[in-house]
Amino acid sequence: MKPRHWLRPALLFLLLAAGLLLGGCHRGEPLPFRLTNISGHMPDLDFKLTDDSGKAVTGADYRGKVAVLYFGYTHCPDVCPLTLAQLHVVMQRLGPLADGARILFVSVDPARDTPAIMHAYVNAFDPRAIGLTGSARAVEALSKRYRSAFTREPSSADGAYEVSHSSAIYVFDRDGRARVLATPSASQDDLVHDLHLLLDTGATP
Amino acid sequence: MKSSTLSLLLAGLLLAGGAHATDADHIRASHAWIRVLPGALPAGAYVTLENDGEQPVALRGAGSTVYAEVMLHQSSRAGGMSRMSMVDALNVPAHGKAELAPAGYHLMLMQPNAPVKPGDTVTLTLQFGDGSTLATDFIARPANALDAGDGHTDHAMPAMDHGAMPHDH
């Protein structure tokens, strides 16, 4: 009869310890990313922009989703659509998990990219893509925040112009923390792998 | 009878000769496609050119009855920046080939006079430095296509299963 007295607290202690250990794994140990791990090196996702339905949004609106951030513009006929098409394939390969992720396509050409144009554009690539545009200042603030850059090139005679822009892809976890940096030439396997890690863990709604 | 056959043959030869002067008959075009973007946004056109002639040939641009403006462009990436620039010509070496493919050389198509939809065929007349031309049919592909959709891939892409694609938001 006597041993029973200490059995219960001991079990409780073991459970607690196990819980702490599991929790420790979750928080402390870095996820084995294949792409450039930027955890702790870039600020959390934050911006004040307008989404492609015309609604004012901030970074906080995408908490609970893994966010894949990419800067570009709709009058870009080659590299931007290629990158978005590749991200679409990545999303497809993630299967139902992809519902936990959003592609955030931020326009570096807000003068031409209205929410309506952005809406048609992003939906031509993936249903989980969101087009973000806003004032030149707001776009620049977001770009600077992630040490990204863009330059409007001189216009041609008919007023057409190109925008040179950073080609990086930034991945944020469900808590809005910057986790992974990729280039458009990154392998799709690596993108799928790293997104899988982020989508599997911390399934906060 | 005999003379009429001869004249027909001669006429045929003359016609062939006439065609020879303008057609780029040493150039073969394949995997020609256009990435269609919504609205009147500029689109990129891609094609593989093979030159089985003894002389190099330079692609200078293309003409179209559908697009008001066509420009030969090159995308490049340096220092983490993507940029696009106009190029005067793309060399197709003798007994060699040149590829216009995503993230590299492409024809930028602007101001379509009618909407171009995926599945449409658009003829672009490729123009070469020696004055020859080559009318080439380009297949219009969806925005999120990665290639001509004819089994040829410029990138090592896994096969896509469009049927299994979730469409929920």
Image: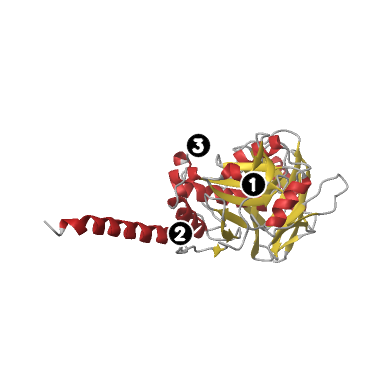
Crowd tier of the residue under label 2, counting other residues whose Cα lies within 10 Å: few below 14, some 14–19, many 20 or above:
few
> Looking at the picture, do discs 1 and 2 lie on one chain?
yes
Q: Amino acid at mark 1?
A: Phe
- Res B56 quadrant in image: bottom right
Q: Amino acid at mark 3?
A: His
| Nearest to viewer (mark 1 / mark 3) | 1
Along the viewing direction, whichever of B13 and A1 lies nearer the viewer: A1
Residue identified by numbered label 1: A105
- How far across and how far down the image is residue B165, in percent? 47, 41
Q: Secondary structure at mark 1?
A: strand
Q: Secondary structure at mark 2?
A: helix
- How far across and how far down the image is residue A118, in percent? 68, 39
Query: Image point 73% across, 58% down: which residue?
Result: A149
How far apart are the alpha carbons under marks 1 and 3?
A: 18 Å
Mark closer to the chain start, 1 or 2: 2
> Mark 2 falls within which chain?
A
> Mark 3 falls within which chain?
B
The correct choice, above or below, for B102 with respect to B63 in the image is below
- Res A133 quadrant in image: top right
Is residue A184 visible in this depiction of the protein? yes
Q: Secondary structure at mark 3?
A: loop
How far apart are the alpha carbons under marks 2 and 3?
A: 33 Å
| Nearest to viewer (mark 1 / mark 2) | 2
Q: How is the image coloured?
A: secondary structure
Residue identified by numbered label 3: B167
The number of numbered discs placed on residues in the rendered structure image is: 3
Along the viewing direction, whichever of A92 and A41 lies nearer the viewer: A41
Residue identified by numbered label 2: A27
For residue A76, the mark is none
